[in-house]
Amino acid sequence: MDQFTINIIFVGGSFMLYVAIAIWARAGTTSEFYAAGRGVNPVVNGAATAADWMSAASFISMAGLIAFVGYDNSTFLMGWTGGYVLLALLLAPYLRKFGRYTVPEFIGDRFYSQTARMVAVISLLVMSITYVIGQMAGAGVAFSRFLEVDATTGLIIAAAVVFAYAVLGGMKGITYTQLAQYCVLITAYTIPAVFISLQLTNNPIPPLGLFSTHVESGMPLLAKLDEIVQELGFRDYTSNHGSMLNMTLFTISLMIGTAGLPHVIIRFFTVPKVSDARWSAGWALVFIALLYLTAPAVGAMARLNIMTTIYPDGTDSQPISYEERPDWMRTWEQTGLLAFEDKNNDGLIQYYNDASPEFAAIAAERGWEGNEMVRFNNDILVLANPEIAQLPGWVIGLIAAGGLAAALSTAAGLLLAISSAVSHDLIKSTINPNISEKGELLAARISMAGAIVVATYLGANPPGFAAQVVALAFGLAASSLFPAIMMGIFSKKMNTAGAVTGMLVGLGSTLLYIFTYLGWFFIPGTNMLENVPANWLFGISPLSFGAVGAALNFIAAYVVMNMTKEPPEEIQELVESIRVPRGAGSAQSH
């Protein structure tokens, strides 16, 4: 059986499963569409949350960024997992106790203001649309390779699948679909990693294999990788080369951005009790850890495999010829995501750091005229990994299904957050408060369909790699929604004027800073946390500015709060009741 047929079987089979689940779990009420009827088991919700969370950025892009940058990009792992601790301890149980459907609804009710609710809607839409671009772009990458279609056609197919199960099932259908998608994606991610770890280190556990001995050389695997990259003029893999300020701010931005993501927060509205919200977050961390502990090993081992593929003898003296390049290179070249250029017409593939002064002299002696791997899209590394390691065809088909499951699961969650904000927070609360439940459900489905169209269009023209685009979304969530939610729960004195001012200052300053440096920000292969432009404010990367935006949000909110009238007494009592640590009810029920 040829590889294309195997891919069709795995991908098509998974799609049929998702649609079948959506039909089985079709939402019939607004409660089921927005919150799955608040009856989801915490373990199931934990797995669904993990799938909702582990997007194309986690599955497809993160290991690629770690592979080609190294230790510096461990910030993705630290920030994203740390954010779930914040979410479990500081937000999830209190928001579930409040008993609302959406984040803007909480902010509007807590700050007794339609203006606050609308600012939250704007913040949610800006963040979620930015985030969903990365998911659709990741789906396009996977489709372009495994179904042998162009990226635009792949996006349309992905959009059709999401439409079939998200519009039909709402949160109820998405929850059980995401449970299935988690099983698919974690299996697809770990099986190739186990095979490759065994090949390179004889250790079947990838996180332990990362620190084991490289079988062929007898050296520690990371030491061998450091040796090879340094021989080719690249910086050593295991050291920090970026700004510690940026690493710290970026980690904080990812942490508080995670805790402020609306599509993740609304998952905790689906469980029956407040205590279940904490358990859901705990289970989500367990399920997420299975992939996140594996990702550094995948990145390091794939980078080593790529190096030794081009330089089979383990030194930089004799690269392979272009005609002898392996099949996986030929296949991925057809997608346009991998490209070579024979700059000196010698028929060999020279892959080295042509910006390295130390290696420039060696390259000149050999007649090399520059790095001939002129393009290697970071997003292809995990998807190409089984082919690089020459694993069986069924593993390649599995990784295809897993990559698409990761992209589509998060896309569905984001699209639900967007449609809920439009139908529940905009149409029902502002435009037509008297709309019937049936009318609101129809509006939610139409909003979802419209969001899918917008996401597909933007996904066809993404501004960067999946993880880069997603990191922008985290900065926006960190600077706008997270401070407002935190102050809404833990500050009885925070009022409408303070919260609205804080959100506008946080969101506005972060957007301004990001777009000021947008031209540099998406240069392929750039270490995003290095101090490259001299005119960065205090050397802060656009990726790291979400933490600064959050600080500005808090400061502006408290300054304005102290200059304006206190919240009504009933609001202060409501905040106090939310913070009661035990209880299965909600401060106010729908």
Image: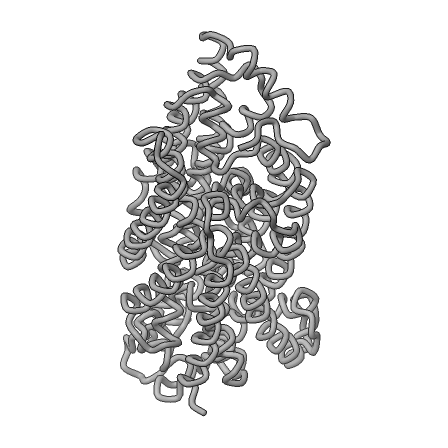
Q: Is residue 194 left or right of residue 393?
A: right
- The residue closer to the viewer here, 97 or 83, is 97
Q: Is residue 125 left or right of residue 153?
A: right
Residue ranking furthest to the right: 582
Image quarter where the N terminus lies is bottom left
Q: Can see residue 122?
A: no
Counting from the top left corner in percent of width and height, residue 368 is at: 34, 74
Colour theme: one colour
Residue ranking furthest to the bottom: 1
Tell me: residue 274, above or below residue 366: above
Determine the residue positioned at 54% across, 83% down: 391
Tally the marks. 0
Asked which quadrant contains residue 156, the reply is bottom left
Asked which quadrant contains residue 186, the reply is bottom right
Q: Can see residue 78?
A: yes
Tell me: residue 135, above or below residue 4: above
- The residue closer to the viewer here, 369 or 199, is 199
Counting from the top left corner in percent of width and height, residue 179 is at: 57, 60
Determine the residue positioned at 51% across, 53% down: 172
Counting from the top left corner in percent of width and height, residue 580 is at: 69, 26
Determine the residue positioned at 39% across, 88% down: 324
